[in-house]
Amino acid sequence: MSTAAAESVGAPKGGASAAVLEIDDLHVTFKTEDGPVYAVRGVDLAVHESEVLGVVGESGSGKSVTMLAAMGLLPRTATITGSVKFRGHELLGLEQGDVRRYRGSKLAMIFQDPLTALNPVLKVGDQIAEAVLAHQEVSGNEATAKAIQMLDLVGIPQPATRADQYPHEFSGGMRQRAMIAMAICNDPEVLIADEPTTALDVTIQAQILEVIQEVQELTKSAVVFITHDLGVIARLATRVRVLYAGRSAEVGNVDDIFENPGHPYTVGLMSSIPRGDGSRLRPIPGSPPNMLAPPSGCAFRPRCPYSAEICEVEVPALRLVGKNDQLAACHFSEQLMGHWDVEG
Amino acid sequence: MTDLQSDPLVAEQAAVQGAVGRVVPHEIIDAEAEQVAPISLSPGLLAWRKFRRHKLAMASAIFLIFVSLTAIFAHQIARYPYEATGVGPVFQGPTSAHWFGTDAIGRDLYSRVIYGGRISLAVGFAVALVATFIGTVIGATAGYFGGKLDNFMMRVTDLFIALPLLVILILMRNLPERQPWASHVMGEAGSMRATIFILSLFFWMPTARIVRGVVLSLKEKEFVEAARALGSSDKRIIFRHLLPNSAGPIIVTVTLNVAAAILTESALSFLGFGVNPPVPTWGNLLADSKGYFSIAPWLVWFPGLTVVLVVLAVNFMGDGLRDALDPRQQRVG
Amino acid sequence: MTRFVIKRLLWAIPILFIASVLVFIAVRSSTDPVAALARNPRVNPEALEEYKHNLGLDRSLPVQYWTWLTDFVRGDWGQSLSSRREVAPDIQRALANTLILGSFAFLITISVGVTVGIISALRQYSKFDNLATGASFMGLSVPPFWFALILQLFFGVTLTKWFHLHEPFLPVAGLYPPGHEGFDPWLRLKFMILPAMVVAVQGIAIYSRYMRSSMLEVMNSDYMRTARSKGISEKRVIVRHGFRNALIPLVTYAALDLGAIVGGLVITEAIFQYPGMGRFFVNAYQNGDYTQILPWMMIVVFSVIFFNLLADLAYAWLDPRIRLD
């Protein structure tokens, strides 16, 4: 059975919440001048109500592309197969007009660089009001009022004045807050955050994470948080999915994954973080694969210290490796878990 | 892909695994080699490869080389001297003796077009080179040093760019006759040197704007900061770092300037304000022919189409160069 | 914003002043009003001196400049040296004609060029785009004077012969048929079609390419993706977010382009014998008639400076990031 189904069967213990967003066997291929780029090669994903799912991976892992595909925001050069269901409704293959009813209202997204992600020539308040007007039957004034209310909600001081200003008049952190305000104004059930803090200073990062957390507690929406920063995951996420080269490497609860990782890549990621206890940094050797011609078999094999012949031949399937429905895609997870050679 | 299997250490591991069922970590011998190795190309070679893919640009480049060669070897290729009158009947259409026909006083049009190419192309290339040089220097200075100097220069340039080029060129054309000092600087009125001088005087401005823009955007990049931190002088930074990186847009600008210069020169000649007769330029030829259009249309078609084809080729080549040199499209391997 | 406007306006005054000095120097050093007379053997030296004195040519250059400038701003533009007619009404008529032709050509250019550019960008690499690109290259490579000749031949001679008309299919010269009196808008239009086409062909090539690249750049911007993620209609995304931003550099360019109309139709007017500013200048220059050339240059310079200012203002109005100046 698909891993998404497996996940929803063993859903987080905190309540019988249904999967709000289910992605099944997603494949995304881009047509480029140099040939097809296989960005996503069979990813399953499920997010449940009130859950914060962290999606972790390097550049090129397919983490952003997966969620953009779910939102229907990929360019025409992308071929998408698989299934994306919002509360059981299939989104892929819908007419644009139908997808748009979900986009911005049920499913909302915030992006990485708020400076370029906001239209520089339109007022911030107008941009938020636009999102409101697209999905709610309200008057222009009511939409503006709602925009101001949203700005207030995300902690922007003097929201009425600010709504009348342009993006370049906001600081980086405030711009990101404004983006969040724009995303939540229609009370979405799934909020997708695509590396929202990567372009910000560390102190501002913490603030934005707090805002997202507050928003999530308030709206009870599901959050998909895309990042390459494990620290953020540790802080915010309830469940984690690790992606590598367009496929899932590991999925599980945050605590389980951190305590007992099941995939060499996850281990590598964690060893790459400075821990402040004097231990040496152990970066993963090599670099992410070229998605024009990904390695055969397990994509991580060339950089994996535990690889063997089978890894080149057979793509490891995502399977149950630990308690609490932890899944990992490695041929040797059972042998290695708990025995990772992490000493410098 | 390396043959990992043939590596003795790995083979041993495989054997061990098969026997014991336990995975032992091993050295990553060559993680990079697994990947489709990016071919490391110099920017020049990379650009050349991309340019080659542009069939139209390549064809245009070949065509231009061909045309330039005919201009250089005009003496050998032309069948009659350009000023020789009466070498054929007056107003005769294309024949085997006169491939492009003859004009009102019996001159061979084909030879005149070939020689005309000399002037037009020479002026075109010369103006483009001089103007680009001046424009690059000024634009780079303005862009790099910024501030009031930049502001002032750009406002001035903006103003001058919008002035009617043709009018000013016409006004300046006879300057050497009126003012003796001018003839020392720019040559005799109606000479090729004067035409090049005048055209360059205005063609450097759009180039300066473009170079300034490029330098401005490059100035903020980290490699400049790094160079400065290493103690490089301004001059060194400009010449060693900024200019080479601006080479792309500059080359494209040169190409487009050639096209513009050829067109402008021919317009000037057409109106009678270009190089003096009987030296032919393509514009001259068209000026001579315009009255006889109905009776001798070849006099208008041949020089005209020549200009069109040459300028078209330059434009196509410029477009191909722009694509080939676009830093945003640098894809390796 | 108002401070921006005022600052720019204040700068315009000294610029105009300096421009008038430069214009005066340039024109006076390039023209020799007495050359024609001096060559005439029937004019004796005393008459020549008297002539020079009447023109004020024996006074120092700065004095001459000041006299001219004060007269100029008062509206006294003198008489033509060659025809003795008042300069002002003649120039004004020429100016009006050029403005009419220029505006007509500009309208065609903008409407066709911008539309083609937008469609090309939205349907990048499609047949339409490739065709439009090819046409643009042609438009940019064809010398306008040659194109004008071809048009004259085709519409004036060839088509007339084909359809056995006794008057040209489209008029190829002048403002009205010879001997025509009064104002007739349709006739005017008919006579402007060919010259406007010549001007518009180049313009369309430039504007469509410019619009296309501007639109493409905007379409690839992050904020387009954000706009789509809000679930608004694609039409609204393209118009309100895409087009609005793509238009900014074009408006600036168009403003500058307009400023150049006044002096920029020299070739077209020469070939089509259209009595506008271009033809006025060429005639004046060939006669060494600096009393005509001076106000002519001033009008052109003023137009350039004025539209430069307009371009700045338009840019600031459209792009709020600039207003911090």
Image (spheres, grey):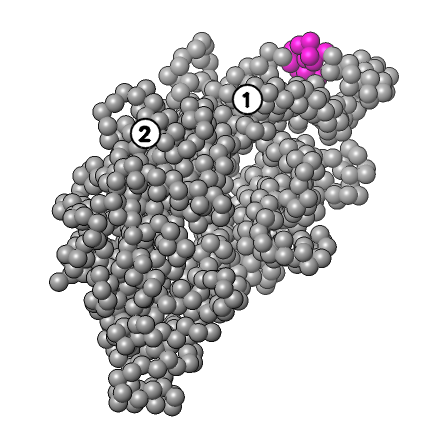
Label 1, on which residue? C1
The residue located at (74%, 35%) in the rendering is: B175
Q: Is residue A312 located in the magenta-colored stretch of the structure?
A: no
Chain under numbered label 1: C
Q: Quadrant of residue C21?
A: top right
Q: Is residue A129 above or below residue B308?
A: above
The residue located at (61%, 27%) in the rendering is: C282
**Amino acid type, mark 2:** Glu
Q: Which residues are magenta?
A: C71-87
Label 2, on which residue? A130
Q: Is C140 or C144 nearer to us in this picture? A: C140
Q: Is residue C84 located in the magenta-colored stretch of the structure?
A: yes
Residue B77 placement (x, y as % from top left): 56, 61
Q: CA distance from mark 1 to mark 2?
A: 26 Å
Residue A289 placement (x, y as % from top left): 37, 67
The residue located at (22%, 64%) in the rendering is: A323
How packed mark 2 is, by other alpha carbons closer than 10 Å (few <14, some 14-19, many 20 or more), is many
Chain under numbered label 2: A
> Which labelled disc corresponds to residue B275?
none
User: As drawn, is B43 to the left or to the right of B232?
Assistant: left
Q: Is B313 or B10 nearer to us in this picture? A: B10
The residue located at (24%, 63%) in the rendering is: A326
Disc nearest the viewer among 1 and 2: 2
